[in-house]
Amino acid sequence: MTLEFVLSRLDHHVVGRGVRHAFPDIADAVAAVREGRNVLGAIPFDMSEATALIEPEEFYRLDGPWATVDAQPPLPTVTVAGQVPDPSVHVQRVRDVVEQLKAGVAEKIVLARAIEVTADSPIDPASMLSALVARDPMGNGFLADLAPMSESGRHIVGASPELLVRKRGNIVSCHPFAGTAARSADPDEDTRISAALTASAKDQAEHRFVVDEIRAALAPFCETLEVPEAPQLSSTPQLWHLSTPIVGDLADPRTSALDLALALHPTAAVAGVPRAAAMDAIRDLEGSRGFYAGAVGWTDGSGDGEWMVAIRCIELAADGLSGTATAGGGIVAGSDPDAELEETTAKFRTVLSVFER
């Protein structure tokens, strides 16, 4: 039975195999959960586009991060074949958006750019997932078939550090990330970078936009909601982040993880503030993002589940010979265009690192 879905975390992983039913329309997926069915897969950045959500034939959860005992083909050599847009164009877009923000168009707009990669042999999604999970200290990784009803579908594979929402019983939790700096191999410099990020008024303001939006989205669902006053530092091997763990008690335990994911998505961390103005700007400048900055996750028949923000990822073509990796950054009035370009470059390293020899 084909592997349709994996979500890996440090203490557990969830797997979906086979397709019992596909839900291109998000409303059908919500209805299926309310009927007590398992739903998993990927939600696009723009929810007006078709989803890649399914009810799997097999659905199971096991302890520990994901690892497969099946033999997997080695990862091929890849080449960066193009950048969309050209880096100079991205820098100019940031300059233009900064001027728009200063003029009051919005408070924050997240801009992204992409790299196109080609491979000398097919990239196996499960092989790439294994490599990502092995390199991630938190065991993070995800894989979802984006065309689950075809014999050879496109896949999204990544290692997101950002929890969109988790629901277990009556407890809901989120862990948004916003405010980023590339790490250094030099310990002293790395410490200096983390301290500078913590002290950055620009990054603190960007992070607060995200937290305030999540608070407003979750409050109608919760009896209590705990939101720390200041963010904490979180890290991946490549990056430092400002992050805030948020925990609440649901007023109605029948609210599902999918309901909550749809109420939160897209957060200010991947879209902006206010959401409508930011989404309009993103459509105008970038066009469709596909499943980048969407959500990947699962909700079981009881309504429990976990959804991650679909970042640090690549969308692989059906033949595995090419893929598109996208990375973005939150632009506020105090953003530096060249620094924003460097931030996206650092974010690409998560997926590119697994192909290094």
Image (spheres, helix red, strand yellow):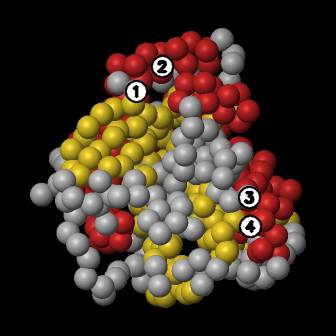
Alpha-carbon distance for marks 3 and 2?
33 Å
State the residue position of label 4.
29
- The answer to whether the residues at label 1 and label 3 have Cβ atoms under 8 Å apart is no
User: Disc 2 or disc 1, which is closer to the eye?
Assistant: 1
Residue furthest to the front: 151
**Numbered label attached to residue 93:** 2
User: Disc 3 or disc 2, which is closer to the eye?
Assistant: 3
Alpha-carbon distance for marks 2 and 4?
36 Å
Earlier-in-chain disc, 2 versus 1: 1
- The answer to whether the residues at label 2 and label 1 have Cβ atoms under 8 Å apart is yes
Please state which amino acid type lies under the numbered disc 1.
Answer: Pro
Q: Residues within 10 Å of mark 2 (few under 14, many from 20)?
A: some
State the residue position of label 1.
85
Place residue 171 in its image quadrant: bottom right
Residue 251 pos. (x, y %): 87, 69
Q: How many marks?
A: 4
Q: Tag 4, which secondary structure?
A: helix
Q: Tag 3, which secondary structure?
A: loop
Residue 271 pos. (x, y %): 61, 38
Residue 342 pos. (x, y %): 33, 32
Earlier-in-chain disc, 3 versus 2: 3
